[in-house]
Image (cartoon, rainbow, N blue to C red):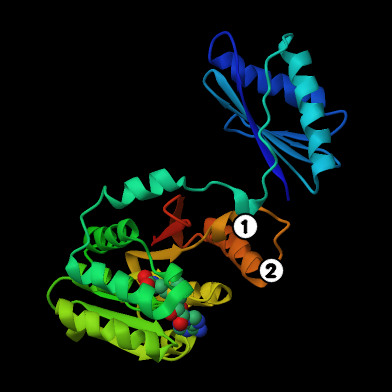
Amino acid sequence: MPVSTAQVATTGPAHATRQLVVQLVSHLCEEAVTELAADGRGIITFRQGTCVLAPFGHQLDLIAAAADHDALAGVQRAVTRHLHIASGAELPVDWTEPAAGEDLDLLHPLLGDYLLGQCTPADEVLQELVAETREATGRAAGMQISQDEGAFLAMLVQLVGARNAVEVGVFTGYSSLCIARALPEGGRLLACDVNDDWAAIARRYWERAGVADRIDLKVGPAIDTLRALPAEPAIDIAFIDADKVGYRAYYEEIVQRLRPGGLVVLDNVFLGGRVLDPAYQGEDHVAMRSLNELIVADDRVDSVMLAVRDGVTLARRR
Ligand SMILES: C[S@@+](CC[C@H](N)C(=O)[O-])C[C@H]1O[C@@H](n2cnc3c(N)ncnc32)[C@H](O)[C@@H]1O
């Protein structure tokens, strides 16, 4: 689904931008379904597509989306025309070239690279694990979490004061290593994966890092491992980074067993931007989209979705 955005510089006091949205919502209600959200955003649903009007101080952000390029152009024209009428001025509206969900620049490569250098540096063991994973697994190496995400996970483990951790999706063990190292003496990590070849690499690095004795690796479908856990709420932190269609079942099994204040961390909740684009209706996309909605509505947890790499959701048990 093509998406296009524009940032319009408005004039007058900052509240005038919010007022402009109110006017636009009212002007457009004859040709579209309009909604004024409590946070001041206007949401316009035309027959051929949608446009969100988001006021920020002296700037109005426009986010238009439609099923195809012609429909998108129609949405852009309608919004631009009404903006000019409502503002009484020919404010310049420079729409970006249409982009599809997977083309969204979620993280500029320059920023991605900068972030790698702005966290506790990966030590030799982690760096060598990255190099061996690239060599041994080829394209699959892209599944490994990044250095900054590893540092983030380790910090979460420490902030939560976790002693009892669970990981779903080990691959060659980078994230497990970050979690296990951050646990205190006597802490345990239950690590689940189906692939014993990749896990063999993980085991070697856990040994080298001196944390192998605190990791219980279970090779087999993670759902069976999770369902076999005792029912009591003993998990302090869990990291889910495996098959996307399985996330919902993993989340459910884990949330029931989280102690109050315990955290479940879900990786890849953007799916490279495809969750934002309803044109993507693959099994993974549908599953992730619906899980994201379910978590927001889940009154057992407080949650926040962060733009860390491919999207990370934190859900904390109430
Ligand atoms: C994205 S990778 C995990 C990356 C890892 N967290 C890291 O930092 O390197 C996903 C892993 O999930 C595992 N996996 C896929 N389906 C699974 C299942 N049903 N049960 C357990 N693990 C599964 C795959 O074998 C793969 O190793």
Residue 137 image point, x, y percent? 42, 79
Three-letter code, disc 2? Gly
Residue labelled with disc 1: 274
In front: 134, or 79?
134
Secondary structure found at label 2: loop
Left or right of 193 on screen, residue 74: right
In front: 208, or 157?
208
In front: 262, or 267?
267
Residue 242 image point, x, y percent? 47, 75
Residue found at x 67% / y 50%: 100
Ligand 1 is in which quadrant of the figure?
Answer: bottom left
Alpha-carbon span between mark 2 and mark 1:
10 Å
Residue found at x 37% / y 73%: 134
User: Earlier along the polypeptide chain: callout 2 or callout 1?
Assistant: 1
Is 40 above or below relative to 195? above
Left or right of 100 on screen, residue 26: right
Residue labelled with disc 2: 282
